[in-house]
Amino acid sequence: ATQRSSVGQRLRNDVQTGCTAAMDQIKSELALGGYRAIDTATPISNASAGSITFEYWDDHAEPLVGHNNNTRVTYRRATTAESGGGPDGIKPGDLVRESYRYATPSGPFDTTPTKQVLVDNVLSLGFTYMQSDNTPWDGISLGGIKTIRPTLTCASSREDPVSGKTLKI
């Protein structure tokens, strides 16, 4: 019983740690959205209920020949298996961060992203967009988005041996 309880606690800890770290990264990068962006009026280029693409100047970007530090980032939940993102590739349910760098001197952004899996077993990823008057975004003008509220629900990789249920956070 003690061993099963320990496994259950480890599962809870793994889900909570992974999901929290992913949410912290999303919120941190969203806070940078528009910082020294090429188009500061509309740094968001795609906004949907389940994904977002935006750009900012990354002061800590790795030097890349022929590119500056303008970075375009997409957050999305994978729905099919894909290559990239790590040694095992990307699996359905993975939270994927795609980043593109801006080619100098005059662009455009790279067409092939660098993919990174932030956490697996994501049940849902959502974004709620608000305008400056704190009303829901009209869905028309990307420049009208002033606040973004991300939500993330993750599950454990297996059932808790004590409860027999898959943990969700």
Image (cartoon, helix red, strand yellow):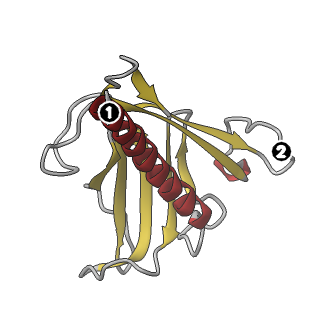
Say which amino acid is labelled 1: Thr
Q: Is residue 28 above or below residue 123?
A: below
Q: Is residue 83 above or below residue 40?
A: above
**SS for callout 1:** helix
List x then y, in percent, for residue 152. Answer: 52, 38
What residue is disc 1 on? 2
Alpha carbons under labels 2 and 1: distance apart: 49 Å
Label count reads: 2
Quarter of the image for residue 156 reads top left
Q: State left or right for residue 38 relative to residue 17.
A: right
Q: State left or right for residue 97 relative to residue 150.
A: left
Looking at the picture, tell me which residue is in the foreground, 117 or 67: 117
**SS for callout 2:** loop
Q: Which mark is residue 134?
A: 2
Looking at the picture, tell me which residue is in the foreground, 11 or 142: 11
Quarter of the image for the N terminus: give it: top left
Label 1: how many Cα within 10 Å (few below 14, some 14–19, many 20+): few
Say which amino acid is labelled 2: Asn
Residue at horizontal 61 percent and vertical 63 percent from the top:
31
Mark 2 vs mark 1: which is more N-terminal? 1
| Residue extending farthest right | 133
For the question of whether residue 59 can be seen, the reply is: yes
| Residue extending farthest front | 2
Label 2: how many Cα within 10 Å (few below 14, some 14–19, many 20+): few
